[in-house]
Amino acid sequence: MEVHRIRAAVLRKKGGPLEIESVEMEGPREDEVLVRLVASGICHTDIDFCDDWDEADTPVVLGHEGAGVIDRVGRSVKTVRRGDHAVLSYESCGHCRQCRSGHPAHCKRLYEANFGFKRLDGSNALQRSGVRGHFFGQSSFATHALATERNLVKVSKDLSLELLAPLGCGLQTGAGTVMNSLKVSAGKSMAIFGTGAVGMAAAMAARIVGANPVIGVDIHPMRLKLALELGATHVIDNRHDEVASRIADITGSGVDYVVETTANPKMHRLAIDVLNPQGTVALLTGENGIDLPEGRRTLGIIEGDAVPQRFIPELIALYRAGQFPFDRLVKFYDFSEINQAIADAKRGDTIKPVLRISEV
Ligand SMILES: [Zn+2]
Ligand SMILES: [Zn+2]
Protein backbone atom coordinates (compact mmCIF):
# COMPACT_ATOMS: atom_id res chain seq x y z
CA MET A 1 0.00 0.00 0.00
CA GLU A 2 1.11 3.56 -0.65
CA VAL A 3 2.43 5.65 2.21
CA HIS A 4 1.82 9.40 2.22
CA ARG A 5 3.52 11.98 4.34
CA ILE A 6 0.84 14.33 5.63
CA ARG A 7 0.55 17.08 8.23
CA ALA A 8 -1.92 16.61 11.04
CA ALA A 9 -2.93 18.38 14.26
CA VAL A 10 -2.12 15.80 16.94
CA LEU A 11 -3.61 15.72 20.43
CA ARG A 12 -0.94 14.65 22.92
CA LYS A 13 -2.00 16.64 25.97
CA LYS A 14 -5.37 16.66 27.72
CA GLY A 15 -7.16 19.89 26.80
CA GLY A 16 -4.63 20.64 24.06
CA PRO A 17 -2.93 22.49 22.51
CA LEU A 18 -2.98 20.47 19.29
CA GLU A 19 0.43 20.30 17.59
CA ILE A 20 0.70 20.26 13.82
CA GLU A 21 3.14 17.45 12.99
CA SER A 22 4.37 15.40 10.06
CA VAL A 23 2.70 11.97 10.10
CA GLU A 24 2.78 8.93 7.78
CA MET A 25 -0.51 7.64 6.41
CA GLU A 26 -1.05 4.29 4.66
CA GLY A 27 -3.76 4.07 2.05
CA PRO A 28 -6.14 4.27 0.39
CA ARG A 29 -7.39 0.71 0.65
CA GLU A 30 -9.61 -0.60 -2.13
CA ASP A 31 -12.83 0.74 -0.55
CA GLU A 32 -11.28 4.08 0.47
CA VAL A 33 -10.46 7.41 -1.09
CA LEU A 34 -7.66 9.74 -0.16
CA VAL A 35 -9.00 13.28 0.20
CA ARG A 36 -6.77 16.34 0.10
CA LEU A 37 -8.50 18.56 2.61
CA VAL A 38 -9.24 22.15 1.67
CA ALA A 39 -11.04 22.95 4.93
CA SER A 40 -12.46 21.49 8.11
CA GLY A 41 -15.08 22.78 10.49
CA ILE A 42 -14.51 22.44 14.23
CA CYS A 43 -17.43 20.87 16.08
CA HIS A 44 -18.09 20.76 19.83
CA THR A 45 -17.47 17.02 19.82
CA ASP A 46 -13.85 17.73 18.80
CA ILE A 47 -13.48 20.15 21.69
CA ASP A 48 -15.11 17.79 24.21
CA PHE A 49 -12.80 15.01 23.08
CA CYS A 50 -9.79 17.24 23.57
CA ASP A 51 -10.88 18.10 27.10
CA ASP A 52 -11.89 14.57 28.12
CA TRP A 53 -9.02 12.71 26.46
CA ASP A 54 -6.88 10.53 28.69
CA GLU A 55 -3.12 11.12 28.37
CA ALA A 56 -2.46 7.41 28.95
CA ASP A 57 -4.09 6.84 25.55
CA THR A 58 -2.32 6.86 22.18
CA PRO A 59 -2.28 10.37 20.64
CA VAL A 60 -5.10 11.05 18.17
CA VAL A 61 -6.03 13.23 15.21
CA LEU A 62 -9.50 14.75 15.60
CA GLY A 63 -11.68 16.66 13.11
CA HIS A 64 -14.89 15.42 11.49
CA GLU A 65 -16.18 18.19 9.23
CA GLY A 66 -13.73 17.83 6.38
CA ALA A 67 -14.15 19.03 2.82
CA GLY A 68 -11.68 18.56 0.03
CA VAL A 69 -10.65 17.26 -3.36
CA ILE A 70 -10.46 13.53 -4.11
CA ASP A 71 -6.81 12.72 -4.70
CA ARG A 72 -6.72 8.91 -5.00
CA VAL A 73 -9.46 6.34 -5.32
CA GLY A 74 -9.39 2.68 -4.21
CA ARG A 75 -10.19 0.00 -6.80
CA SER A 76 -13.71 -0.82 -5.64
CA VAL A 77 -14.88 2.80 -5.26
CA LYS A 78 -17.55 3.57 -7.84
CA THR A 79 -19.23 6.88 -7.05
CA VAL A 80 -16.35 9.37 -7.13
CA ARG A 81 -13.16 9.95 -9.03
CA ARG A 82 -9.96 11.90 -8.74
CA GLY A 83 -10.62 15.65 -8.85
CA ASP A 84 -14.18 15.47 -7.50
CA HIS A 85 -15.11 17.77 -4.62
CA ALA A 86 -16.51 16.14 -1.49
CA VAL A 87 -17.84 16.94 1.96
CA LEU A 88 -17.12 14.33 4.63
CA SER A 89 -19.65 13.24 7.22
CA TYR A 90 -20.07 10.55 9.88
CA GLU A 91 -19.18 6.92 9.18
CA SER A 92 -21.40 3.84 9.29
CA CYS A 93 -20.80 0.15 8.57
CA GLY A 94 -23.05 -0.16 5.51
CA HIS A 95 -23.96 -3.77 6.32
CA CYS A 96 -26.14 -3.89 9.43
CA ARG A 97 -29.93 -3.90 9.27
CA GLN A 98 -30.21 -0.20 10.12
CA CYS A 99 -27.67 0.78 7.45
CA ARG A 100 -29.38 -1.42 4.85
CA SER A 101 -32.79 0.05 5.66
CA GLY A 102 -31.51 3.61 5.13
CA HIS A 103 -30.88 4.60 8.76
CA PRO A 104 -27.09 4.84 9.05
CA ALA A 105 -27.38 7.18 12.07
CA HIS A 106 -28.63 4.10 13.95
CA CYS A 107 -25.84 1.85 12.64
CA LYS A 108 -25.08 -1.01 14.99
CA ARG A 109 -21.36 -0.18 14.79
CA LEU A 110 -21.81 3.62 14.93
CA TYR A 111 -19.67 4.05 18.03
CA GLU A 112 -16.73 2.00 16.72
CA ALA A 113 -16.96 3.55 13.25
CA ASN A 114 -16.81 7.12 14.56
CA PHE A 115 -15.05 7.00 17.93
CA GLY A 116 -12.96 3.84 17.58
CA PHE A 117 -9.94 5.67 16.06
CA LYS A 118 -9.44 2.75 13.68
CA ARG A 119 -11.04 1.15 10.65
CA LEU A 120 -13.83 -1.33 11.32
CA ASP A 121 -11.33 -4.15 10.66
CA GLY A 122 -9.20 -2.81 13.51
CA SER A 123 -6.38 -1.35 11.39
CA ASN A 124 -5.11 2.21 11.67
CA ALA A 125 -3.61 4.10 8.72
CA LEU A 126 -1.46 6.29 11.01
CA GLN A 127 0.04 3.35 12.91
CA ARG A 128 3.58 3.97 11.62
CA SER A 129 3.68 7.33 13.40
CA GLY A 130 2.22 5.99 16.65
CA VAL A 131 -0.89 8.12 16.24
CA ARG A 132 -4.52 7.10 15.83
CA GLY A 133 -6.82 8.49 13.11
CA HIS A 134 -10.16 7.56 11.50
CA PHE A 135 -12.15 9.84 13.84
CA PHE A 136 -15.68 9.81 12.33
CA GLY A 137 -14.09 7.84 9.51
CA GLN A 138 -11.95 10.86 8.57
CA SER A 139 -9.74 12.74 11.14
CA SER A 140 -9.92 15.97 9.16
CA PHE A 141 -7.57 18.18 11.20
CA ALA A 142 -4.95 17.24 8.64
CA THR A 143 -3.82 17.94 5.11
CA HIS A 144 -5.22 14.55 3.98
CA ALA A 145 -7.83 12.09 5.19
CA LEU A 146 -9.08 8.66 4.21
CA ALA A 147 -12.82 8.28 3.76
CA THR A 148 -15.25 5.74 2.31
CA GLU A 149 -18.24 6.06 0.01
CA ARG A 150 -20.44 5.86 3.10
CA ASN A 151 -19.21 9.10 4.67
CA LEU A 152 -18.37 11.03 1.54
CA VAL A 153 -20.79 13.32 -0.28
CA LYS A 154 -19.85 14.52 -3.75
CA VAL A 155 -20.65 18.22 -4.15
CA SER A 156 -20.76 20.65 -7.03
CA LYS A 157 -17.61 22.64 -7.80
CA ASP A 158 -19.29 26.04 -8.00
CA LEU A 159 -19.55 26.43 -4.21
CA SER A 160 -16.43 26.84 -2.12
CA LEU A 161 -15.36 23.78 -0.15
CA GLU A 162 -14.37 25.92 2.82
CA LEU A 163 -17.96 27.09 3.10
CA LEU A 164 -19.45 23.61 2.71
CA ALA A 165 -17.20 21.88 5.29
CA PRO A 166 -19.42 22.34 8.37
CA LEU A 167 -22.42 20.69 6.69
CA GLY A 168 -20.95 17.28 7.54
CA CYS A 169 -21.84 17.25 11.23
CA GLY A 170 -23.13 20.21 13.26
CA LEU A 171 -25.38 21.81 10.68
CA GLN A 172 -26.73 18.48 9.46
CA THR A 173 -27.49 17.55 13.07
CA GLY A 174 -29.40 20.75 13.90
CA ALA A 175 -31.41 20.91 10.70
CA GLY A 176 -31.95 17.14 10.57
CA THR A 177 -33.35 17.13 14.09
CA VAL A 178 -36.15 19.49 13.04
CA MET A 179 -36.75 18.13 9.54
CA ASN A 180 -36.02 14.37 9.85
CA SER A 181 -36.15 13.30 13.51
CA LEU A 182 -39.00 15.47 14.84
CA LYS A 183 -40.65 16.16 11.45
CA VAL A 184 -41.93 19.43 12.88
CA SER A 185 -44.99 20.75 11.04
CA ALA A 186 -46.14 24.33 10.46
CA GLY A 187 -47.58 26.16 13.45
CA LYS A 188 -45.89 23.98 16.10
CA SER A 189 -44.08 25.80 18.90
CA MET A 190 -40.43 25.20 19.63
CA ALA A 191 -37.74 26.32 22.04
CA ILE A 192 -34.06 25.92 21.19
CA PHE A 193 -31.73 25.72 24.20
CA GLY A 194 -28.30 26.87 23.08
CA THR A 195 -27.87 28.87 19.88
CA GLY A 196 -24.47 27.58 18.82
CA ALA A 197 -24.01 26.12 15.35
CA VAL A 198 -26.35 23.17 15.99
CA GLY A 199 -29.06 25.36 17.58
CA MET A 200 -28.79 27.95 14.78
CA ALA A 201 -29.21 25.24 12.17
CA ALA A 202 -32.30 24.07 14.07
CA ALA A 203 -33.63 27.66 14.08
CA MET A 204 -33.13 28.02 10.31
CA ALA A 205 -34.87 24.68 9.75
CA ALA A 206 -37.71 25.70 12.10
CA ARG A 207 -38.32 28.76 9.94
CA ILE A 208 -38.24 26.63 6.78
CA VAL A 209 -40.91 24.23 8.11
CA GLY A 210 -43.05 27.09 9.48
CA ALA A 211 -42.77 26.39 13.20
CA ASN A 212 -44.12 29.26 15.32
CA PRO A 213 -43.16 30.58 17.78
CA VAL A 214 -39.49 29.60 17.72
CA ILE A 215 -37.82 30.68 20.95
CA GLY A 216 -34.02 30.83 21.17
CA VAL A 217 -32.45 30.58 24.63
CA ASP A 218 -28.78 31.37 25.25
CA ILE A 219 -26.42 33.41 27.42
CA HIS A 220 -24.57 35.20 24.60
CA PRO A 221 -26.34 38.39 23.41
CA MET A 222 -24.48 38.29 20.06
CA ARG A 223 -25.84 34.83 19.32
CA LEU A 224 -29.38 35.73 20.38
CA LYS A 225 -29.37 38.68 18.03
CA LEU A 226 -28.27 36.46 15.15
CA ALA A 227 -30.84 33.78 16.12
CA LEU A 228 -33.58 36.37 15.60
CA GLU A 229 -32.28 37.08 12.12
CA LEU A 230 -31.94 33.43 11.15
CA GLY A 231 -35.16 31.84 12.42
CA ALA A 232 -36.10 32.57 16.03
CA THR A 233 -39.26 34.63 16.52
CA HIS A 234 -38.35 35.33 20.17
CA VAL A 235 -35.22 35.05 22.27
CA ILE A 236 -34.59 34.70 25.99
CA ASP A 237 -31.34 35.68 27.65
CA ASN A 238 -30.89 33.00 30.27
CA ARG A 239 -28.60 35.21 32.37
CA HIS A 240 -31.28 37.80 33.05
CA ASP A 241 -34.67 36.24 32.33
CA GLU A 242 -36.62 33.42 33.89
CA VAL A 243 -36.94 30.99 30.99
CA ALA A 244 -40.06 29.01 32.02
CA SER A 245 -42.17 32.08 32.78
CA ARG A 246 -41.03 33.88 29.63
CA ILE A 247 -41.98 30.83 27.53
CA ALA A 248 -45.38 30.76 29.26
CA ASP A 249 -45.82 34.48 28.43
CA ILE A 250 -44.99 33.90 24.77
CA THR A 251 -47.02 30.73 24.12
CA GLY A 252 -49.75 30.91 26.76
CA SER A 253 -48.73 27.38 27.79
CA GLY A 254 -45.51 25.54 27.02
CA VAL A 255 -43.88 24.43 23.78
CA ASP A 256 -44.45 21.39 21.57
CA TYR A 257 -40.72 20.82 21.05
CA VAL A 258 -37.50 21.68 22.79
CA VAL A 259 -34.20 21.20 20.99
CA GLU A 260 -31.69 20.85 23.85
CA THR A 261 -28.08 21.37 22.76
CA THR A 262 -26.44 22.56 25.98
CA ALA A 263 -25.80 19.25 27.83
CA ASN A 264 -26.43 21.16 31.06
CA PRO A 265 -28.51 19.03 33.51
CA LYS A 266 -30.48 22.11 34.64
CA MET A 267 -31.46 22.86 31.05
CA HIS A 268 -32.43 19.23 30.51
CA ARG A 269 -34.80 19.45 33.52
CA LEU A 270 -36.14 22.82 32.35
CA ALA A 271 -36.77 21.43 28.87
CA ILE A 272 -39.14 18.84 30.34
CA ASP A 273 -40.81 21.45 32.58
CA VAL A 274 -41.75 23.71 29.66
CA LEU A 275 -43.04 20.91 27.43
CA ASN A 276 -46.71 20.66 26.39
CA PRO A 277 -48.51 17.30 26.72
CA GLN A 278 -47.53 15.07 23.72
CA GLY A 279 -44.43 17.23 23.37
CA THR A 280 -40.89 16.06 22.63
CA VAL A 281 -37.51 17.18 23.90
CA ALA A 282 -34.81 16.42 21.33
CA LEU A 283 -31.57 15.69 23.19
CA LEU A 284 -28.57 16.50 21.02
CA THR A 285 -26.32 15.83 23.95
CA GLY A 286 -25.52 12.12 23.72
CA GLU A 287 -28.20 11.13 26.25
CA ASN A 288 -30.86 8.53 25.55
CA GLY A 289 -34.56 9.35 25.45
CA ILE A 290 -37.32 8.23 27.82
CA ASP A 291 -41.13 8.33 27.93
CA LEU A 292 -42.75 10.74 30.39
CA PRO A 293 -46.33 11.28 31.64
CA GLU A 294 -49.03 12.76 29.33
CA GLY A 295 -47.33 11.61 26.15
CA ARG A 296 -44.29 13.78 26.75
CA ARG A 297 -40.98 12.22 25.86
CA THR A 298 -37.32 12.89 25.42
CA LEU A 299 -35.59 11.58 22.33
CA GLY A 300 -31.84 11.03 21.95
CA ILE A 301 -30.83 12.14 18.46
CA ILE A 302 -27.72 11.31 16.44
CA GLU A 303 -26.69 13.35 13.38
CA GLY A 304 -30.29 14.49 12.86
CA ASP A 305 -31.15 11.02 11.47
CA ALA A 306 -29.64 12.25 8.23
CA VAL A 307 -28.45 10.11 5.34
CA PRO A 308 -25.60 12.45 4.39
CA GLN A 309 -25.68 11.69 0.64
CA ARG A 310 -29.32 12.75 0.56
CA PHE A 311 -29.56 15.43 3.24
CA ILE A 312 -26.40 17.48 2.57
CA PRO A 313 -27.45 18.15 -1.07
CA GLU A 314 -30.86 19.19 0.29
CA LEU A 315 -29.21 21.68 2.66
CA ILE A 316 -27.06 22.99 -0.19
CA ALA A 317 -30.21 23.53 -2.30
CA LEU A 318 -31.82 25.41 0.61
CA TYR A 319 -28.66 27.52 0.96
CA ARG A 320 -28.78 28.39 -2.74
CA ALA A 321 -32.44 29.38 -2.34
CA GLY A 322 -31.46 31.75 0.49
CA GLN A 323 -33.34 29.71 3.11
CA PHE A 324 -30.39 28.18 4.94
CA PRO A 325 -27.85 31.02 5.23
CA PHE A 326 -25.31 29.09 7.30
CA ASP A 327 -22.49 31.25 5.94
CA ARG A 328 -23.58 33.75 8.62
CA LEU A 329 -22.27 31.38 11.32
CA VAL A 330 -18.81 30.80 9.92
CA LYS A 331 -15.49 32.40 10.80
CA PHE A 332 -12.38 31.23 8.94
CA TYR A 333 -8.99 30.51 10.49
CA ASP A 334 -5.72 29.36 9.05
CA PHE A 335 -4.90 25.72 9.90
CA SER A 336 -2.00 26.95 12.06
CA GLU A 337 -4.52 28.93 14.17
CA ILE A 338 -6.40 25.79 15.21
CA ASN A 339 -5.88 26.33 18.94
CA GLN A 340 -7.08 29.93 18.68
CA ALA A 341 -10.16 28.75 16.78
CA ILE A 342 -10.94 26.21 19.52
CA ALA A 343 -10.50 28.84 22.24
CA ASP A 344 -12.82 31.28 20.42
CA ALA A 345 -15.48 28.57 20.01
CA LYS A 346 -15.24 27.61 23.68
CA ARG A 347 -15.77 31.21 24.79
CA GLY A 348 -18.73 31.48 22.43
CA ASP A 349 -17.17 34.27 20.37
CA THR A 350 -17.11 32.16 17.21
CA ILE A 351 -20.16 30.07 16.37
CA LYS A 352 -18.64 27.88 13.68
CA PRO A 353 -14.89 28.01 13.18
CA VAL A 354 -13.66 26.64 9.86
CA LEU A 355 -9.97 25.91 9.25
CA ARG A 356 -8.49 26.76 5.87
CA ILE A 357 -6.09 23.90 5.17
CA SER A 358 -5.13 24.22 1.49
CA GLU A 359 -6.06 25.95 -1.74
CA VAL A 360 -8.51 24.28 -4.11
ZN1 LIG B 1 -24.35 -0.22 10.06
ZN1 LIG C 1 -19.78 16.96 15.27
Image (tube, rainbow, N blue to C red):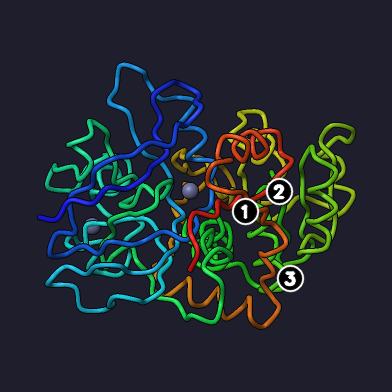
Res 91 quadrant in image? bottom left
- Position of the N terminus by quadrant: bottom left
Q: Which badge, 2 or 3, comes first in the chain's sequence?
A: 3
Above or below: residue 23 compared with residue 57: below
Residues at marks 1 and 2, CA–CA distance in whole angstroms: 21 Å
Q: Which residue is mark 1?
A: 279
Numbered disc in front, either 1 or 2: 2
Q: Position of residue 258 (x, y in %)?
A: 65, 50
Numbered disc in front, either 3 or 1: 3
Which residue is located at x 21 percent, y 69 percent? 73
Q: Nearer the viewer, residue 117 or 12?
A: 12
Q: Which residue is mark 2?
A: 195
Q: Which residue is mark 3?
A: 187
Q: Are marks 2 and 3 in contact (CB under 8 Å)?
A: no
Going by the image, does 90 lie left or right of 158? left
Going by the image, does 298 lie left or right of 227? left
Above or below: residue 281 compared with residue 345: below
Going by the image, does 110 lie left or right of 177? left
Q: Nearer the viewer, residue 83 or 11?
A: 83
Q: Nearer the viewer, residue 103 or 344?
A: 344
